[in-house]
């Protein structure tokens, strides 16, 4: 496979995000195949254990991995690998739904499966897919935030949908001065919608219903440092 064909950074993460709702195949038990497909990299290693051992540019588990890099675990029969979204989350196979892809906190995989988190690498299957200085912005899925803003007010307290997406938006709203720091909790309930409506009033035409739309969310992301996935 030619170097020109390799997907890197945002393009790789966007491929992963597209697999959440519209998977191209069943990903059960083939995490390395999923992640190398995100980067459009060919087969070399048989599983995540071998993939991590073979990687040449390794970083430890401290800190937050940048956008669009493989994150690795050892343990179990085959280990595990996922792709980082740059905000402490990742797109992973099998973690919520067998054979499906979901965006989850990196820490959830460690806790749920009892594996050892090894950190991230700049390469996968012999291909360098990240270099120092590469851009790293967290990603917010528009459909996830809209669903949470529509449904969270009717859910039990503290049990919001798509918390990893919502909390990025909440932090941005806090920086804009329309949401209190104490309310940044990953739940897009009534208070979230009131805060987001204030942002809408300042940036876009009506309606000011507190449900994020593409234009207002992209403007917030541009101002406060996140990307919007549609």
Image (tube, helix red, strand yellow):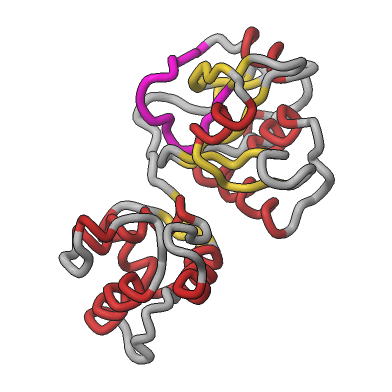
Please give the name of the residue rendered at 66% of the width and 15% of the height, measured from the top-left corner.
75
> In the drawing, does residue 17 fall left or right of residue 177?
right
In the displayed structure image, the side of residue 18 where residue 208 appears, left or right:
left
Residue 173 percent across, percent down from the top left = 26, 63
Q: Is residue 177 above or below residue 2?
A: below
In this rendering, is residue 47 above or below 130? Answer: above
Residue 62, percent from left and from top: 37, 20
Residue at position x 72%, y 27% in the image: 32
Residue 80 part of the magenta segment = no
In the rendered picture of this protein, how many numbered marks are placed on residues? 0
Q: Is residue 206 above or below residue 187?
A: below
Specify the quadrant that holds the N terminus.
top right
- Name the image quarter holding the C terminus: bottom right
Residue 177 vs residue 220, the one in the foreground: 177
**x 67%, y 53%: residue:** 20
Looking at the image, residue 177 lies above or below residue 34 = below
Residue occupying the far front of the picture: 156
Q: Is residue 188 left or right of residue 113?
A: left
Within the image, what quadrant is residue 104 found in?
top right
Which stretch did the figure color magenta? 57-72
Magenta stretch encompasses residue 62: yes
């Amino acid at each position: 496979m030619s170097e020109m064909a390799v997907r890197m950074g945002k393009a790789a993460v966007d491929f992963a995000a597209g697999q959440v709702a519209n998977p191209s195949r069943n990903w059960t038990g083939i995490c390395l195949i999923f992640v190398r497909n995100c980067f459009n990299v060919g087969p070399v290693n048989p599983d995540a254990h071998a993939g991590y051992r073979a990687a040449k540019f390794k970083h430890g588990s401290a800190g937050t991995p940048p956008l669009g890099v493989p994150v690795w675990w050892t343990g179990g029969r085959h280990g595990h690998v996922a792709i980082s979204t740059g905000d402490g989350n990742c797109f992973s196979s099998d973690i919520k739904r067998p054979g499906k892809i979901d965006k989850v906190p990196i820490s959830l995989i460690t806790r749920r499966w009892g594996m050892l988190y090894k950190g991230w690498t700049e390469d996968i299957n012999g291909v360098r897919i990240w270099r120092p200085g590469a851009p790293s912005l967290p990603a917010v899925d528009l459909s996830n935030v809209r669903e949470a803003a529509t449904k969270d007010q009717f859910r039990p307290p503290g049990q919001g949908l798509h918390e990893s997406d919502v909390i990025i938006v909440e932090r941005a709203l806090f920086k804009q001065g329309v949401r209190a720091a104490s309310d940044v909790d990953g739940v897009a309930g009534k208070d979230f919608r009131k805060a987001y409506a204030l942002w809408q009033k300042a940036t876009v035409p009506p309606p000011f219903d507190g449900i994020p739309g593409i234009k207002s969310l992209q403007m917030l992301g541009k101002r406060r440092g996140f990307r919007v996935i549609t």
